[in-house]
Amino acid sequence: MTDRFETLAVHAGAEPDEISGGVSPSIQMSATFRQDAVGKPRRGYEYGRSGNPTRQALEAAIAELEGGTHGLAYSSGLAATQNLLYLLEPGDRLILSDDAYGGTWRLASKVWSRYGVQTDAVDLGDLDALAAALSGTPAPRMVWVETPTNPLLKVVDINAVARLAASAGAMTVVDNTFATPFLQRPLELGADVVMHSATKYLSGHSDVISGLLATGRDDLEERLRFHQNAAGAVPSPFDCWLVMRGMRTVAVRMERAAANAAAIAEWLAGRAEVSKVYYPGLADHPQHELAKRQMRLPGAMLSFELAAGEPAARRLAEATRLFTLAESLGAVESLIELPAAMTHLSVAGSPLEVPAGLVRLSVGIEAVEDLLADLEAALQEASA
Ligand SMILES: *Cc1c(COP(=O)(O)O)cnc(C)c1O
């Protein structure tokens, strides 16, 4: 019998502790493990960078939640991304979603470019543009999808991209940070690897920096596992435990946050001060139908622009009381930010540049009436 996601989220990777029977996994801080004879580790663990029981529990959990067979944990989302990019060779080409996370673009365009990997930013919502990019030389080795995108909330058809990429011999990676496996299942849609900044929804409390990968491909797991150990960007056992604790409640948090976001998006769309709202749950969102097909719920991230432009957007972001002005996203508390001046500063002047007056909300799980009242007061202050 296959359990539903909500059940898996609570139980995935959880084996009662062998010694104490503890229901919460033990945090095993040991950096090294006793060997019974030379080269004969007692429980298969030798050295903490190569393997650790707390980390292994988290890795099993993300594999289960994404419907894969292997999970890998890292010290940050970008460390997970870096580890994936080690699959590329000099001369390879990477196709990146044209409003991908700024840090992903920075790593590809400023670091990997120095090692001979060329990155092209493509609007993955335009399958003709993708087909053209895939037929270029050298042939792309990897297509990096982010959906919904950050911060413009475009929705990309994962199955269509994965099929096109596979027919051109490229693998498909999906950054599933915004959606979580509760809302969206990239491996079932044909992706080869799923990447997460577990800093966001999976841990969900703004208290840990962490990254995860999941795949159903044994050949990729072997290479990724080699690089995880070889490059060493592994998470601490305590961080692994924190992420796992957060993952237990991801379904209920996501449900509440998405319901709040939907109500806020509708409310903003009806305000005269707001010129544009970006949220896949709105009927006038360009990929609304695709979002309904591909995602269980449209998520809890949304962006909007004010008719009065950037100065008013700045005043608004500084005027909210409950929405904390901060980078990051995906936690219980609501956050507000201006991507062009904060999270997306590193993409200024690049194809990934975002509108200066764009405001991004990460909607939390507070009472929606309080969040709306907060936005109402801040909108009034910003347009005074
Ligand atoms: C935050 C984020 C990352 C990077 O993850 P870190 O944990 O900050 O290294 C990658 N992709 C998306 C969509 C993110 O939001």
Image (spheres, rainbow, N blue to C red):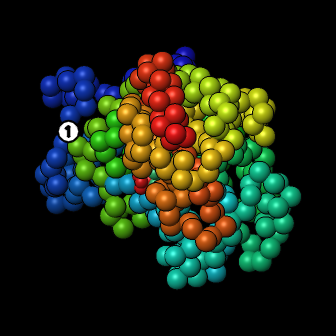
Q: In this image, 202 relative to 147: left or right?
A: left
Rendered residue at 73%/50% (across/down): 162
Q: Amino acid at mark 1?
A: Ile
Image spot of residue 97 (x, y percent): 66, 58
Q: In this image, 185 relative to 379: left or right?
A: right
Image spot of residue 309 (x, y percent): 62, 51
Q: In this image, 163 relative to 344: left or right?
A: right
Q: Quadrant of the N terminus?
A: top right
Image spot of residue 239 (x, y percent): 27, 44
Above or below 51: residue 274: above
In terms of depth relative to the viewer, which is nearer, 100 or 119? 100
Quadrant in the picture for residue 13: top left
In terms of depth relative to the viewer, which is nearer, 309 or 178? 309
Above or below 234: residue 259: above
Image spot of residue 227 (x, y percent): 42, 64
Location of mark 1 (residue):
27
Q: Is residue 370 visible?
A: yes
Above or below 185: residue 350: below
